[in-house]
Image (spheres, rainbow, N blue to C red):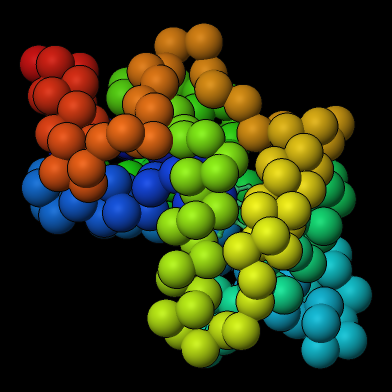
Amino acid sequence: MMFTVAIDGPAAAGKGTISKAVAAHYGFAHLDTGLLYRAVGAKVLAGADPVVAAQTLQSSDLNTADLRTHDVAQVASQVAVNAAVRDALVTFQRDFARRDGGAVLDGRDIGTVICPDAPAKLFVTASAECRAARRHKELRERGDDISADQVLADVIARDKRDAERATAPMLAADDAIVIDTSDMTIAQAVAAAVAYIDVRRT
Ligand code: DC
């Protein structure tokens, strides 16, 4: 059985949490596609050429420690503007989406570019303030000593770069449902996602 769930949206909107919960609910495999760009970003920070890093990326690179840091996120967003980097990562994502047993992919362009034929598409969003507050809490808990203002400024800068780039910008697909998690609990957001996917599966 093949069934692809495409989940897009900006940073810290809750798409990772929802994706994991949806994958667990249906027994589907999950790919956080942001990790691909983060892994390329980490290699670039270490001195690699972005296109070569993307073309030679291995699954094992996704398990590298420290891909979740704030600095890596910013470089990931910068390398993600490069069309040749994006091209190099398409096949891996499409192969994952077509795996037997079902797949959930979360990112920025899954419903629009990577899996335009996915039967279930969600766009998970929240206000920039709300997302920055969540991300700040997460970073502080991880020991990152960054100010709330800096996190908000970076969230806004990253949104702008991700949404305004020429190739595969962050965008809700025309046929995606939009879930705004600003005033929702995790349980409510997951329930909304599952209710929508249940309908798409019948
Ligand atoms: O989801 P994330 O915060 O881990 O993603 C890091 C960056 O990677 C994000 O700012 C933009 C880029 N990205 C992308 O361009 N396309 C995707 N499908 C996933 C992430």
* Quadrant location of the N terminus in the rendered image: top left
For this view, does 157 lie left or right of residue 10? right
Give the percent coordinates (x, y) of residue 141.
Answer: 42, 81
Residue nearest the observer in this picture, 48 or 18: 18
Instruction: Say if residue 110 shows up in the picture.
Output: no
Please tell me which residue is depicted at 32% across the width and 33% down the height of the picture: 183
Q: Is residue 170 visible?
A: yes
Residue at image position (28%, 46%) is 18
Q: In this view, does 113 lie to the left or right of 116?
A: right
Q: Is residue 82 above or below residue 151?
A: above
| Camera-nearest residue between 81 and 59 | 81
Q: Residue at x 50, y 61 (%)?
A: 135
Residue occupying image coordinates x 53% and y 19%: 173
Q: Can you give x and y, in whole percent of width and height, for residue 33 in the image?
A: 52, 55
Q: In this view, does 106 lie above or below 63?
A: above
Residue farthest toward the top in the current orientation of the protein: 174
Where is residue 201 drawn, in percent x and y? 15, 22
Q: Where is residue 83 in the image (x, y as percent from the top left)?
A: 83, 45
Q: In this view, does 9 lie to the left or right of 39?
A: left
* Placement of 157 over or under 144, stated as above or below: above
